[in-house]
Image: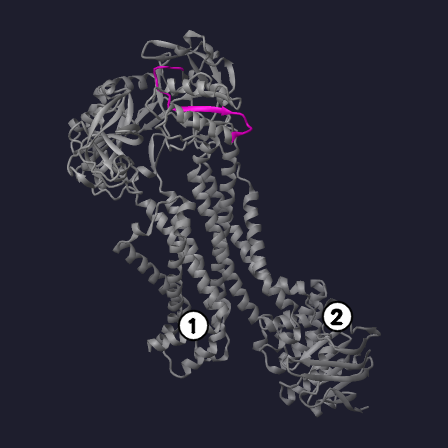
Amino acid sequence: MLRNYFKIAWRNLIKDKMFTILNVTGLSVAFGIAILLAMAGFFDLSYDKFHTNADHLYKVYSVQQTSKGPEASVSQPAPLLEALKAEVPGIEKASRYLQQEAIVSFNEKEINMDAVWVDADFFDMFTFPSLKGKINNPLEKQSSIVITESTAKKLFGDEKAIDKTVQILINGKDHPFNISAVVANNLPQSTLEFELAIPFEKEADYQNNKDTWDSSYHDVYIQLANGVSPKQFEKATRALVDLNLQEQIANAKRDGAQTNADGRYYKFDILPVTDVKFTKFKNGYAEVSRSTPYLVLGIAFLILFIACVNFINMSIAKSGQRLKEIGMRKTLGAKRKQLFLQFWSESFFVFCISVLLGLMLSILLIDSFKTIFRTAVSFDLLISPTIILSFLSTVLLITVLVGGYPAILLSKLGTIQSLKGKLDHSGKNKVRDGLIVIQFGIAILLISGTLVLREQLDFMRNKDLGFNKEQVLSFPLYGKKDSHQALQLLRNELASNPDILEITGADNNLGLGKDGSLSKSIYGFEYKERVIYTNSLTVDYDYVETLDLKIVKGRNFKRGYANDSLSVVINEAMVKELGEKDPLTAYVTVSDSIRYPVIGVVKDYNFEKLDKSIQPITMFLNNNEGLYYAYVKVAPTNMAKSYDVIKQAWKKIAPNATFLGSFLDENINRTFRKEEKIAKMITAGSIIAIVLSCIGLFAISLLLITQRTKEIGVRKIIGASITNITFLLTKDFLKLVGVSFLIATPIAWWFMKEWLQNYPFKIDLSIWSFLAAGILTTIIALLTLGVKTLKVATQNPVKSIKTE
Amino acid sequence: MIKITDLEKYYKTEELQTIALNKLSFEVKKGEFVAIMGPSGCGKSTLLNILGMLDDSDGGSFIFNGEEVIHYNERKRANIRKHNIGFVFQSFNLIDQLTVFENVELPLIYIGVKKAERKKKVYEVLEKMQIMHRRKHFPQQLSGGQQQRVAVARAVVNNPKLILADEPTGNLDSSNGNEVMDLLTELNKQGTTIIMVTHSEHDAKFSHRIIRMLDGQKVIENSLI
């Protein structure tokens, strides 16, 4: 019997090849794309879940009440760890965590590496399986370090790594460390990334900071015992807050800060480690949002939904052609169940073929998908019984629901009704129309989303940031030389080159450089009996000139002015913060008592990503502080050549350091990766959504037009023109697209408005983006309908009325 | 009103060419009621399609109301058709999705008659055809005779000068058939020219003149008046 079902199913499928091709193509593409998107979405959601103790691991953050409201921070002071361990019950393990570059030498090799400075508990808390060397507590000795497999390869090639000694540059001096363990490479879904791990106590500033509560510069992770809640943790930390943070609390009171709901000025809280990747701090609250992976999964779902709608609509539309068959089968004694199985087996057949083709498509596309959407997802990560089982159940569920609905409708038909070949379309047309409205609604939603997203991205890319991003190149000053000295050597090296216009340095980069490093340094000081926070930036001479910043008052640091290294240049936002009529009378207090006068004010410029408003910034000219980045302004001509010249010069100065130079406009564009990824996903999603919707529309119009051929002939005979006929055949569909537009636009508007809230610098939402999406969809739908419609409208009516 | 001279029509397939109309000539005067008879495949329907400007001829001349229309394009022919010609078919060819009223109203929409006037004209003609009470019904809800009356109503609603009827009683029983023939006769009396293709000698007797065809040619013409 089953064989018979499949045999007949196969015959029916090959009987109408066009229809089968449209159906299978739509479903296969949808399955293929949905598989890729779902993989990417689930991959993102799996961040940091691989740690065996993931459910008990937390990151500590603090919330300080200030006169401007609560402010949260994950940076903690060095003594916090011991205080937490001593006073908070339920902390089983804890580790500080500081990510910094380290120059590692072994024999002739000198490599700049991503290092983390952590406590001994780190490797017991987190799952970074040891492959060689000590399995437990590999950082027990302070002279030990842990490296990853690929680091071992970089340093020692195929030689054994365990017990080898390497030198690490700390405070300008090489220190020997012994390799105690080699761990597996970091998984792509880990937010904790490192090439080597070094005991925290060995960190350059540790000795100065180990008892200091007012210098926060590293993260803290803890492992809590079962049953300890974040609230209990917060309560347990209150005593240590009161004991150690008296000054901060007193300042907050004096500055008029409001207490939090518990009547406190300062609190410690914790964040599950699996939420870290998705957390943004807003007004002192940790906002956990998994919107990006959910958006990706949402698009996957919508694409599958559209393809399933096509399948249902096409099956129902086609049912009209099989009424006589149904009637005849019923007359001959077929039961409803048998008819259901007959039709369902056809759907099952189509679904099986489509899933297989979709799977093949996703395997074919995975590499391009990974490149285009910058995801580290791979099939290997997903080969687990749970995932395979859920995939199979999803496919089965879709097959049962989507294939089952038309099968139920057809098997329910009465015998006489079927034999007469008449189908009461009214009810089913409503379902069909509703589904088409949803399909096109989705397409319009995604298209308008794409348009707005791209508009905002263009706006951000082209916005005048207040500095020269086109002509300035920056690169990290890696290497063992003192950075000020290295910068001077660079100046000497390039002095005679007319294409090199200015050279300077700073301890921070603008945008995201090729080193992938982003950092900020916040400095707080007392100013006229209140605390003022400012971004702090150590710069070299010519910073303002190199970046073409505008001095609005006073002057920039100048050579020959002996006191300039004890002065500051600030931006306009900082002027507001200081609240002085004449900013040149203001000062910044350093080390409790020394006042650094403001000698100049620069016009506000976007030194952070455009999702942040311009904050106060203070520039210091301090020869004792390291500069981490060089900035070189080049002439607008020969920029590529200048890049090479700088690269060669740097090679002479630091032969062992890699040159990671890039122009600031490239750096800025790199900061939009997340937006670009979303834009690409939505663009791809909307293209696929509209193509799939049109495949469905095309197939349905094909069937409906065939059903109406005679009517078209009659209308032409009694006077309808080609325009009348075309209008007649397309108006119903266009009406549906119109309804989709009316429903989708407010939803799209709301979503885009919410999304734009993330950006202080944003476009104004205009109705045109939404109208454009509607018009584009209408045109595409019209073109889809047009092909067949025009053919029928111009057909000889005598032929049409003979169609019975 | 109509004058055809040496009208030709061929149907070509890859292998052979069939002559449907072979240099056919005749004339129909205004106000005449002409029946065209002949065995199946003699070219009756082809002739009617050409006279109705639904199909092209392959040669000859076709003068309609003093105008040579043989080389007119689709648009011009459609224009003449919708203002001058009404059609009645054997299988009624009503549109199932439209009510009786809407079916009859359709030709008026296509010639741009305003809504109020359309309603007036449709009511008049429905009244005349005695199917006013059925105006809100769909074609499937009517008997064959009623459906053909609706079809006739639709054919005459815009006062065409010519009605082309292709076996108008072919799908009807004798009593309904007679009713339809009476209707056509009445219309003819009011001045409408009628050309009717039929197999029925009985129906043909309602006409003024019978043109008998064979193999695409006129073989005999009998005047009944």
Is residue B197 rendered to the left or right of residue A213?
Answer: right
Dot 2 corresponds to which residue?
Answer: B77
- Chief SS of the magenta region: loop
Above or below A83: residue B134? below
Quick one: which residue is furthest to the right in this view? B66
- Can see residue A437? no
How busy is the neighbourhood of tag 1: few (under 14 within 10 Å), some, or many (20 plus)? many
Q: Which residues are magenta?
A: A621-639
Viewer-proximal residue among B208 and B143: B208
* Callout 1: chain: A
Q: Quadrant of residue A598?
A: top left
- Can see residue A433? yes
Q: Position of residue A405 (x, y in %)?
A: 40, 66
* Residue shown at the point (82%, 90%) measured from the top left: B225
Q: Position of residue A176 (x, y in %)?
A: 21, 26
Dot 1 corresponds to which residue?
Answer: A410
